Image: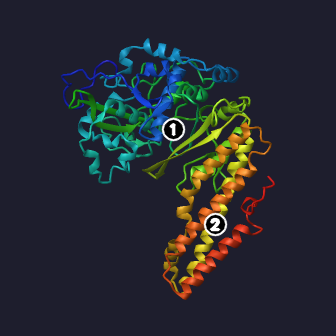
Amino acid sequence: MHGNRPPDPAGQRPSWDPRFKPCIPTVTVAGATAHHSLCGIFAQADHLAALDCASPGETVAVLEYLLAICFASGTCPSSDEEWRAWVLNGRSLASAASWLADQPADSWNLFHPVEPLSQNSALADDLRESGTGTAQLIIEHAGDYNQHFDHHHLELDNPLPAADAFRATLTQHAYGPYGRARMSGDRLGAKVTNLAAGRLTGRIRVVVLGKTLGETLRLNLYPPDGPGQPLNTSWTTPGFERRGFKEKAKPRAPRSSADLHSSLGRSILLHPVRGPRGQVMVDRVLIGAGEVLALDPTSHLQDAVYSETTNGVRKPLWPSPSRALWQQAHALYSAVMDDETGTYARLRSLLPRRRTHLGAPYHLWAVGLLANKTLPVAWTHGCYPYAPGMAAHLYRASRRGSVIAEYIALILKKAAIVAAETAFPAMRAADESGQVARLDARYAFWPAAEDPFETLLDEVIDRGFEDDDDPVSAPLVAYAMELTATARAQLLQRLDTLPPSDRNHRARTRGERLFEEAVSGERAPAELRGETSVD
């Protein structure tokens, strides 16, 4: 594959030089924004606040790539003890920048004819015949991956800036859902059309966030699995033996941490075009099957938080369309308290320290992709504060906070049912769910409950820094009172939609009475009664 250059996907090479070194993200710097090269990002990592990408998933994918470069360059701690020293002493990441500066320029060329960055040049002939517009590259825009559906939007002429296309490519490698590729397998083999789910698809990826990009990278580095390099710079990176597409892929174990975090979960090829102001753009793309990895939970899923399914199967926490991420925040804090190895054990090893700034020193950022089979639906994410030594307090607050919200939501459902049964006594079974839904305030309650939950955790952190012996109980009672008031108002708004009549007045009264009795009854969580829970 290295001997002969493949023909240009559009039929001939452009008359201009399409070489492009990626400018990873727009980076937030003290309220302003500036573009930074890869080298600049590492050299200035401790002066940069955060990545500013188009979606949570894209941000995670870029962080994964930056971690891969750290591992490839040997910019990583050799032990958990050294990791702790790196975090506490703010170890510079400039060695990654120096390593990058010494790399061959062609290894980082997005449009190299043989080794295009993060791509597979073997797709060149198919790109000419089957390439689509750039909507296919962006997970949120592609729609269902199944090639048998009508997707006119994929043919739209909507060129992307090269930097945007590169970040979208990284996102595809990490999060691309399973499905069928929109290309023929005649040239490379039928299996090139079988898109496996990406390495992070179907699970929640947890990133530990610090106050700067440099601190974030240090927090998420770990003693490497294998030596520095090899980094996946392209499908034709020297020294890599890649899968073929004639037969079903056999999952391979990652060769190193750099290989893991830069793995090519898709075969992708981008076609360059000159934009109206002379800038480098991408106008056509093609996506086929990529690498399939055999992942070891201990080595390769160090951030995973495990939970049990309804069938009792233990698996990494997954995105749920019916349960918001904040309702699972207690699982993150439980992992910090109990895990013996990996990300959370290292976090627990950081000694408590007195506050030197407002707010928690770290945050646990959980990100997942909601999908309906092959159809990506939405990114789901949540950010939860963490301060060393406070995991037990935060676990109690988040678990009780979730229990309280669940109980109130259940009351709202029961109030809707009893009101509907009173207002519509003759309703048919087929109409029951619709009539109950009219009066069910849960749909407004759940989104409104998230902000008070976040305030609860922040308050626990603040009280913990003030050496409060019990930083949880008082904030929990205040949180419970706020949620009760919110739920009561939302229930009354729903019941007010019933037209005036004696029957509807009884329906309203029964719904209100059920709610008030339930929030103050013996079965209610203690905090709803203004008391402190025993656990």
* Mark 1 and mark 2 residues within 8 Å of each other at the beta carbon: no
Between circles 1 and 2, the one closer to the viewer is 2
Q: Which residue is mark 1?
A: 199
Amino acid type for the residue under numbered disc 2: Leu
Helix, strand or loop status at disc 2: helix
Q: From what the image shows, is residue 473 above or below residue 419?
A: above
The crowding category of the residue bearing disc 2, from other C-alpha atoms within 10 Å (few below 14, some 14 to 19, many at least 20), is some
In the picture, the quarter occupied by the N terminus is top left
**Residue 145: image x %, image y %?**
38, 48
At horizontal 42% and vertical 42% (from top left) the residue drawn is 195
Mark 1–mark 2 Cα distance, whole angstroms, equals: 36 Å
Residue 40 in which image quadrant:
top left
Q: Identify the residue at horizontal 58%, vertical 26% (top origin).
A: 215
Image coordinates for residue 166, horizontal then vertical, percent: 37, 31
Say left or right for 506 vs 346: left
Q: Which residue extends farthest top? A: 102
- Dividing the picture into quarters, in which one does residue 441 lie? bottom right
Marked residue nearer the N-terminal end (1 or 2)? 1
Task: Give me the disc on residue 86.
Answer: none
Q: Is residue 495 above or below residue 29?
A: below
Is residue 113 in view from this perspective? yes
User: What residue is disc 2 on?
Assistant: 410
Between residue 406 and residue 377, name the one nearer to us: 406
The amino acid type, in three-letter code, at marker 1 is Arg
Q: Secondary structure at mark 1?
A: loop
Left or right of residue 278, residue 285 in this image: right
